[in-house]
Image (spheres, rainbow, N blue to C red):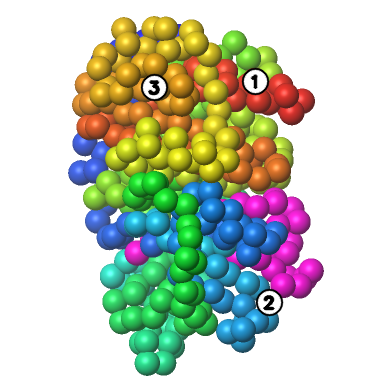
Amino acid sequence: MTETISRGAANQAGARLDADAYAKAADFLPLNGIDHVEFWVGNARQAAAYYRALWGFTPVAYSGLETKVRDRASYVMVQNDIRFVFTAPLTPDGEIAEHVRAHGDGVHDIAFAVDDVESAWRETTSRGAVSALAPSALDGGEDGVLRRASIHTYGEVLHSFVDRSSYAGVFAPGYRKVKAPARAAGGLSLLEVDHCVGNVGLGDMDRFVDFYRDVLGFAQLIHYDDKVIHTEYSALMSKVMTNGNGRIKFPINEPATGKKKSQIQEYLDWYRSPGCQHIALRTEDIVGTVRRLRDNGVEFLGLPHEYYATLADRVGDVGVPIGTLEELGIEADRDEEGFLLQIFTRPVQDRPTFFFEIIERHGSRGFGVGNFKALFEAIEREQAKRGNL
């Protein structure tokens, strides 16, 4: 198993952390956080039911035929500061239907909360971003005005800029409030989106690192090369980009040459384009949350006993007995800033593409570098079952 990597050792091993990255990020694009993530899916009603029953999200808004929208149905689901929107096509034609046909269910829009949509759109498009939606004021009648604009990033993923300061409605004009169901999955404490991971093709990582730096003003927080993220069979390279206040962190991955196909290449093969590979959700009670998710039917990757046999020596006391971590399949890692606990789901749809990470942080700003080898081996076991290794 890999050993704990301090910042100095990480430099030698190919993992580089820039402690001053937040300060280096430019301030021409103030971002207040992630406003919402929109998924385009084959069946929005069933997706909403899945995230309510298994993940404990509460439906708050709906848009569709009943709200005079003719081409799509959307359900807005909320848990604490996490807001997901699930949108499905109502006809076999159009961009949503084409997207689902090509990619299956996947992330379409990672939207940012901003104070000034016009400025955000102007600053990014003037620096080379391709506009997907010019600044627009959506009239919500008595609820006020929602302002929004969008730009393209990797694959078919968008970044929208959303200003809700003059809007008092439930989500956006064209949506109606949904009465919460009497029963929903409880015992969960998913608090916010910790980071969103993008997979791009071989040779494209640096291009999109440059995009986030030059167009959105992000700075590089960490660089992991294939000396760090590898097994006997496969490897990848990753750079983590962050905005100035640290609220938004985007790792960008690309495959690296190996004996067999990496998880990044499997994603690209089945999603059929670059896209968002996984979203990490932060919790302050990973043990209770994972227990409840498992009870609800969420499936996680498993790790062998050998990983846990040496874990205490590698990470020390993390506040949870090693036996409990092994029972639930939770991983642990420590760096000089603190430690973290994390776990990864299996893909949450039929194609081996998008999945979730649950993460609990105690000082560490890292991403579990000490777990990469064990995690990759676990993913490779799943790839072998699917015939994709």
Residue 19 to residue 226: above or below:
below
Q: Residue at x 71, y 43 (%)?
A: 350
User: Residue drawn 43% across and 87% down?
Assistant: 140
What residue sits 53% from the left and 14% below the top?
304
- Tell me, yes or no, whether the highlighted magenta stretch contains residue 92: yes
Residue 217's disc number = none
Q: Which callout, 1 or 2, points at the residue further toward the start of the chain?
A: 2
Residue 135 point in image, percent of width and height: 43, 77
Amino acid type assigned to the residue bearing label 2 in the image: Asp
Q: Which mark is residue 381?
A: 1
* Residue at image mark 3: 324
For the view shown, which residue lies furthest in the right direction?
92
Q: Nearer the viewer, mark 2 or mark 3?
A: 3
Residue 92 found in image quarter: bottom right
Does residue 82 appear left or right of residue 265 in this picture?
Answer: left
Question: Is the Cβ of the residue at disc 1 closer than 8 Å to that at disc 2?
Answer: no
Determine which residue is flagged by label 2.
71
How far across and how far down the image is residue 157, in percent? 55, 55
Position of residue 361 measured from the top left corner of the image (x, y, whole percent) = 29, 34
